[in-house]
Image (cartoon, helix red, strand yellow):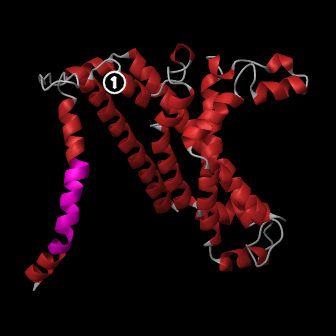
Amino acid sequence: MRYGKYRFIASFLAVPLLLYIVFVVSPYLQALYISMTDWRGFSANRNFVGLANYAELLGDGRFWRAMWHNALLLVVVPVVTLAIALFLAAMTTVAGRRGSVGRGGVRGSRFYQVVFVFPHVVPLVIAGVLFGFFYNPEAGLLNGLLRLLGFDGLTRAWLGDTTFALPSVMAVLIWSFVGFFYVVLSAAMKSLPTEVFEAAVLDGAGGIRTFVSITLPMLTDSIKSSYIYLGILMLDGFALLQVMLPDGGPDGSTEVVAQYLYRAAFTDGRFGYASAIGVALCVVTLALAVVVLRMGRRERVEF
């Protein structure tokens, strides 16, 4: 009977597992093999070079600079995005007037919910084009508003300044993703049990105390999952940066690893080295997921 049960389960899993191996595992293995060759991408010649590409990667200053830009995106964008999304979700879900204990938002919450989600509806590529005009030093709306308000000294070539180019791109990323995570956190807040909020009200807890001591701890899993998802996106960051700053920004000040990989493959014709960059980026992404998941597990055990 046990053998029959396992055979029954295997009959259902065989096809999905085969498809997963062919279309997911196999490309990873191919990329790993290509990363150990000097393949130029446009010929059948592939000379096995072992770990030479990885050794070169360790001493590649441009790669580490691009990785540093990804690290900045990984720290700044998720933290600011989730903080704003959490604040907006709290204001439209558990703050202000209450239809029931622990529910209800500020006046006009339904209208705000539509407004907050709208930026996420705009495709990232289109957002990059629009904000490229927005940051234009001569005809851009941002410098135009600064001049109108009398702050001419604050105007600058935002995307042409090594100091402000990357923060300007971060602002666009935050604007684009706040709406999505606002929806995620709002849904998580609405699923919280009302009994806990009723007990807090009976104990005399105020709105801020309730949010800090009850709402926020109960959203830990949602926030953790959101951070992993957004962190993986920030370890990529290719689409928006390639639209706004396809050359890596002034003096390479905004180039990320995905852009460097693209240039190594399609500009320099070094597909083997580009594959090594991709494998390294994959390892960093997996490490990020493992670290965040283990931190969350440790917090639950201590609690």
Q: Nearer the viewer, residue 248 or 186?
A: 248
Residue 303 magenta-highlighted: no
Q: Nearer the viewer, residue 121 or 250?
A: 121
Residue 169 vs 16, above or below: the answer is above
Disc 1, SS: helix
The image quarter in which residue 19 lies: bottom left
Dominant secondary structure of the magenta stretch? Answer: helix
The image quarter in which residue 73 lies: top right
Most extreme residue toward the top is: 251
Q: Can residue 26 be seen in the rendering of this structure?
A: yes
Residue 160 vs 120, above or below: the answer is above
Horizontal and vertical percent position of residue 66: 45, 24
Q: Residues within 10 Å of mark 1 (few under 14, many from 20)?
A: few
Residue 159 in the figure: left or right of residue 66? right
Over which residues does the magenta segment extend?
Answer: 10-25
Q: Nearer the viewer, residue 224 or 43?
A: 43
Taking the spot 71% from the left edge, 30% from the top edge, the residue there is: 134
Amino acid carrying mark 1 in the image? Phe
Taking the spot 49% from the left edge, 24% from the top edge, the residue there is: 255
Taking the spot 66% from the left edge, 64% from the top edge, the residue there is: 215
Horizontal and vertical percent position of residue 168: 65, 29
The image quarter in which residue 60 lies: top left
Horizontal and vertical percent position of residue 25: 22, 49
